Structure formats: structure tokens, C-alpha cells
Image (cartoon, rainbow, N blue to C red):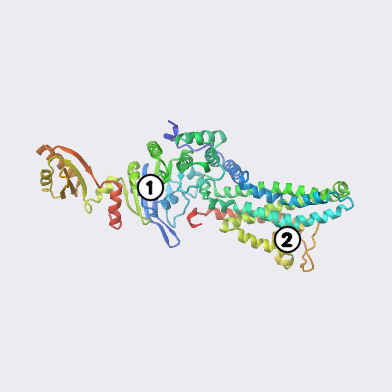
Amino acid sequence: MSDLATPTVSAPPAARRLPWGQMLSQLQAVVRLELRKNFFGRRGIGIWLLGLSPVLIPLIRFIKIGSLQNEPAATATEFFSFLYQIYALRVALFLTCVAVFGNMVRREVLDRTLHYYFLTPVRREVLVVAKYLTGVIVTVPLFVLSTLAAFFLSYLPHQGVQEFLFHGPGLGHLGSYLLVTVLACIGYGGVFLLFGSLFRSPAIPALAVMAWEGIHFLLPPLLKKISVIHYLQSLCPVPMSEGPFAILADAPSPWLSIPGLILLTAVLVAVSAWRIRGMEVSYEEE
Amino acid sequence: MSVQGAGDNRIVYEDVSKFYGEVLGVNRVTLSVPPGITGLVGPNGSGKTTLMNLTAGLLRPTRGAISVLGQTPDHPEEMFRLVGYATQYDAFPPGLTGFQFIESFLRVHGYGRVEAEELTWKAIERVNLVEAAGRKVAGYSKGMRQRIKLAQAIAHRPSVLILDEPLNGLDPMARAEVIALFRELSAGGLHVLVSSHILHEVDLISDQVVLIHGGYVVAEGEIGGVRDEMEEQHPAQVLIRCDQPSLLASRVFLHDHVVEARLLEDGGGLLVRTRDADRFYLLLNEVVIDAGLTVETVRPTDADVNAVYEYLISNGGKS
């Protein structure tokens, strides 16, 4: 007979540790579990494919056209800027963040599994932060890799690539794109994590945000300031033409954009944690 | 089960109500549950799951307060080390094996890898699922899923075990094993709160019962005690099979606590209704010795949870 039959009421070692140490080990355990069940199985396939989709366009271009030795690297700069800002940032990264962060809480409710977390001695704030970090751990490497691959595939067929990269602004451009990628994952992650804790169907408000970000170029300067893309776009190294109807506004300084986005994200995650702290589990209402 | 004497060794409900909008979940529940197996009995929709979810902090009371061994869900770090809950939800995190399912949540509890693995194996052994531990839970049968849920609920050695319809889907052999497990856990000093809409199951398992109907607790306590309190309105029925039922009927009917003595159609016994079962059994002993009767069977026919529940419901909940 197992000694479970005569249980002892001793707390696990974690209870005797300092709270920070305990919370850190719980946070790691939640991250591990989230990665295992949501991203390293069949469920994760769509996310990986969407995340890597920005690579497809320059890859097809490279395979179809092959060498573009007569075209200067500046052509690739224009091509990649367009690809990155129109597709990678506004579509692929945006939708991936909706799928990853928007479903962090929502999918657990639909799967009727959220109670397993709520019945463990983990503070709900820690749970929310762990889920957010899991999303960051998934999206940041995915889009950093995707941006790197798309960048090099865009420049590869052109002449003077080495010169552009190592003696010109190439690596600086790449660094800026990667910074925007990381900030976009962090910022959109915070927005969609909150949507997932506020709305039954986070996809609907996410589409509204997508539309808002899409018409950003038409918005007056004051309204531009309440969109994530306004700050991200200002950090992109190559400005993109927004057409004749665009309303111009001063680009915010990087010293405002970067800490501003991080601060906004911290506020969004805190609000999500507050929402989840008071949340009840009643799947029947879903 | 009174609120007086409530302490850190009880589950205490103080005037607890839960409404879902305008729909009543449970209303004005005041209880103090001691260690042992407590059966929560009522038909589907009576409020059993609501009361369990309130106990485990998955729901917050609209009014009133609950404490579990002195802890409240506002402090999950303390409370959920004490509580294990196998819910009625037949759902599991995707892609995990039985072992991973239990081990992962033990890690979330704060256990280290080695200790979590050790506790996981012990819990899996306890519910006899060792051979299936490496298989995905999604491929388990209903009975296996019930058992892995139970293993997950007991793996961290809780002091309070809450089980919502735990015998659903189990075959007779597994039922017997699981009931034996409840008894062992209860003998170790645990509070086991178990719900079922199958009354004879609860009768079989429980040290005490809470009868719930339409969101109200209609009776609570040790089942015999609850039945005794109802004797005035619902006299106890006792079936006696003996060789001279007419003689027995004539003798017992002389006493004022015997309301009815009816001969069975086959002539082999009688059914007695009495307002004082204890006095009746004493009387029966006297008559048997005095008249030299040969008694084959003496059996109360309405002292089980089923009968008590029927009486209470037909009475509008007024015992």
C-alpha cells in the first residue's frame, strides 16, 4: 500500500522557500507546460507556418528570378522594407500574436482546462505573467528568425551585398528591423493577452485593431499616437511611402517609442492579471 | 455539522449564496464539515457542483464566506496545498500523457523534478494506471480518465479532497477500488467531500451527508440522525419476516408509537410503521422472547439516503 493512503499534511519544499524563489519555479513550470501543450504539438503547426510565411516571398523571388546582379542593393532595400512593413509586421506577426496571446486564456476556457491552473497554489498574477512570457518566448525567436531569413534572402540575389552589409548601413538596418520585431511581439502580445482575458472572442476586437492599424496613414496626428504601428513604424530604418492621401505627422523619437511601448505592455499585462485574479470558472456559460 | 465549534480542522460555510445573474446556484448555506467522507446528495441541477466549486474557489460566493481548514481562496499559495479537486469536467490539457499531466501540475505546485516524479508514480499506482501512464490521456477510456483525474487530485497529498461525481464511468471493479481508496484516505484524517446523484452510492461511502435540493440544503448530518429527526412526520418502516406475523402485529399495535402494522400479502411477515424506532426494536426483542417467535429478517426499509431524500423533497424541504 502506498503511503498516500495515510497522507501527511506537510507542505512541499516550495512552501518553505522565499516567495520570489517559489514564484520563479512556478513560473518556469507554467512556461514549460504551456510550451509543451500548445506549441510543440499539432496545435503549434499553424503558428510556426504563419510565423515563417514572410520568408516565402523572398524565397520564391530568389528561386524564380535567381541572380539580380544588375540590380543594386538599394532595390532590395526597397523590396524588403515593403515586405516587412506591409506583410511581415502588419499581417504575419499581427495574426500570429492574435493566435498566440489571444488564446492564452481563452483557449483554456474553451478546452475546459483552466481550472487545473486555478487549483494549484500559484498566484494568478504569476500565471498570467508566465503565459505572457511563453508567448514572448515563442513569437520573438520565431519572428527574429523569420526576419533574418527574409532579410538575407531579399539581398542575396543583388550585387554589392557584402559592401552594403559590412561597409554600409545593412547591418544597422537589420538591427533596427530586429528591434521592431521584438517590440512588436512584446507590444501586440500585451494587447492580445488583454483581449483574451476581456472578450469571449478576442478575434473580433483584434480585427478592429487590425483595421485601425491599417488606416493609420489616414489618421490625424493625434489619433496616430494611439496605435502600436505608429511607434513601430517610426523605428523602421527605411520609411515607406503611404500614398498621396496619407496625413503626415512627426515620427516619435526612439527614446519615447521604445520605453513607451514597454511601459504600455507592462500596464496591459497588469490589467490582464487583475482581470484573471477575479475570474471565476464557469464553463457552462461559454 | 453545526457552525459552533468550527475551527481550522473544518470546512466552514457561513450563510453562503451564489447567484448566476438571477439564477440561483445555492442559497444561505451554513455548514461546518468535519473530517471523514461527506456525501453531497441531490439530483442534477440541485447545486452540488456549485457548492463544490465555491469550496475550491473556482467560484466566488455572491454572499457569505467559506473557509477550508482556516484558509480562503484569496490566498491560493496556502489553500491549494491543502485542497485537491477532481471536477466533473471531462477535459485535459492537450497532448499530454497521464504521467505528464500529473507531473506537470506538481511542478506548477512548486515541487522539484525528482519529488514531482516520485509523487506522480505513487498517485498513478494508487489508481492502478501504471501501464497506461505513458499513453496520451486523449486515448484513455472514460473510466481511465476518471482515475487519472483522481490521481491528479491526490498527488500532492491534500488534506481536503473534493470529488464531483467520481464514480461516473467506472466499471464495478474500479468502483470498488475507488471506494476503498476513499475509505483509506478518510481513515487517514482527510476531509473527503464527494458528490453523487446516485443515492445508494453515497449511502455506501459517506460518514455524513448533505442533502441539497433547488440550491437549498434540506438536511445534513449522519444519515441515521437525519432519519430519526423525521420520525414524527414520516414514521420509520420496519419489515419483519417471522413465523407468527399476526401475533406480532397484535402485540406491537398495543403501543402508541406504533402507527401501523400491516401483514404482508404472502403471510410471511409484517411491515410496521413507528414514530420511535429505538423503542420499537426494544419492544420487538421483548415480544420475540415472550412469545417464542422465530424471526427470519428485521430490516428498516426507509432509513437510507434515498428514502430520506424522497421524504424531504415531497415535504418541500421541511424536515
Q: Residue furthest top?
A: A1
- Please state, as top left, top right, bottom left or bottom right, where the N terminus of chain A lies in the image: top left
Q: Nearer the viewer, residue A199 or B238?
A: B238
Mark 1 vs mark 2: tell me if same chain: no
Residue B129 lies, with reference to residue A147, above or below; the image says above
SS at circle 1: strand
* Location of residue B42 in the rendering, given as x and y in whole percent from the top left corner: 36, 51
Which tag is nearer the camera, tag 1 or tag 2?
1
Count residues near mark 1 (Cα–Cα under 10 Å), then give few for <14, some for 14-19, many for 20+.
Answer: many
Q: Chain of mark 2?
A: A
**On residue A186, which mark appears?**
none
* Location of residue A58 in the rendering, given as x and y in whole percent from the top left corner: 78, 51
**On residue A230, which mark appears?**
2
* Location of residue B38 in the rendering, given as x and y in whole percent from the top left corner: 36, 44
Q: Chain of mark 1?
A: B
Name the residue beneath numbered marker 1. Answer: B196
* Location of residue B121 in the rendering, given as x and y in whole percent from the top left corner: 50, 34
Count residues near mark 2 (Cα–Cα under 10 Å), then give few for <14, some for 14-19, many for 20+.
Answer: many
Q: Nearer the viewer, residue B300 or B183?
A: B300
What residue is at 69 percent from the left and 48 percent from the top? A140
A232 vs B155, left or right, is right
SS at circle 2: helix
Question: Spatial distance from mark 1 to mark 2, Cα to Cα?
Answer: 58 Å
Q: Nearer the viewer, residue B214 or B65?
A: B214
B124 vs B267, left or right, is right
What residue is at 12 percent from the left and 37 percent from the top? B289
